[in-house]
Image (cartoon, grey):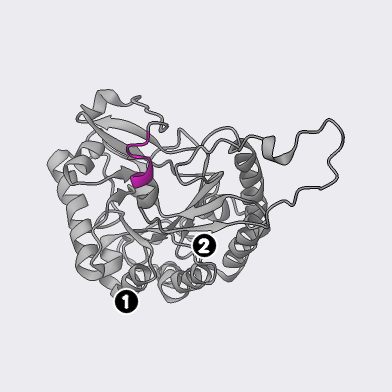
Amino acid sequence: MVLAATVFLVSAFKANDNVGKGSPKEENIPAAKKYWPNGAQLVISVSMQFETGGQPEGAESPFSNTPLPKGQPDLPAESWYRYGGNEGIYRMLDVWKKYNIKVTSHVVGTAAEKYPEIAKAIANGGHEIAAHGISWDNQWNKNYNEELQFVKQGVDAVKKITGQKAVGYNCNWLRRSPNTLKVLQDLGFLYHIDDLSHDEPFITKVKGKNFVVIPYTLRNNDIVNIEGKHWSPDQFLAQLKFEFDRLYEEGATKRRMMSISFHDRIGGTPAMVHAMEEFIKYTKEKQGVVFMRKDDIAKMVMNDPDTPVDNSEAIFNN
């Protein structure tokens, strides 16, 4: 199977011809065990959230602490969201193209309808189009039929524009209902990301069938750290490097995955894209680092016997 992945490898270590007495010869050193089917030591997966135009009135923004009266348009806040469509997505697409990285873009249906040219640009760049609902709305309070229609409308809207039918899902702020995974299974999805319990993908049983969970991140997330905690881009870069270093080291003895989340209006700013580019360069210093779309990860691990199974939510998924 051909995977949309980019492998960054540094030059192979050249063996020292002057091996000391008693040292094992290079040919006698056993090859390191590979914990990913594609031989990677660490898989990195980037989420690029395309939400501009799909936000409701009063959606979170830098102005949320001083909300205007209901019905009064918050024009600066709306312009902040438009930045994602005018600048942010395109700037991120440029850096992904420069390094031949393919990402997963979680697309709100109404955002794609408002900016069809952006949705098409993402798809035409070889990136995964994943579902993110028809609009910014809660799912945790919907019944099964309401939720099924909500998800399906978003999938259909984006497919009509991009030609891609989503197989991965992300709820608004991860807040699923007890029925969400059953809805996704019934609609033919392969995976969802609304889980924070592991640093590797895993399988859970939904209605008796395998369903892949590709854990999301709040640690390497621009909306949490840049907007929520007011980190600077260099602090965010330091976080990425620390996380990468630890997971890469662990990847020598177990399967490890690093998730990163960028939102159009936040991660697409000049300083944040610069920080991401510096991080990409940093990863190139190590062997066996692979950037992958989440649908490719799901297909790779779905039937792999080394993929862990976690049925902690079985009470909701039968």
| Numbered label attached to residue 117 | 1
Tag in front: 2 or 1: 1
For this orientation, the residue located farthest to the left is 145
> Would residue 272 be counted in the magenta stretch?
no
Q: Secondary structure at mark 2?
A: loop
Q: Is residue 67 visible?
A: no
Give the residue displayed 63% in from the left and 55% down from the top: 283
Instruction: Say which quarter of the image contains residue 302.
Output: top left
Callout 2 amino acid: Gly
Instruction: Determine which quarter of the picture holds residue 73.
Output: bottom left
Look at the image and give the residue range highlighted in magenta. 298-304
In percent of width and height, residue 155 lies at 22, 57
Circles 2, 1 touching at the beta carbon (< 8 Å): no
Of 269 and 68, nearer the camera is 269
Distance from the alpha carbon under mark 2 to that under mark 1: 20 Å
Q: Residue at position x 40%, y 33% from top?
A: 307
Determine if residue 165 is in view.
yes
Residue indicated by mark 2: 267
SS category of the residue bearing label 1: helix
Q: Is residue 300 above or below residue 310?
A: below
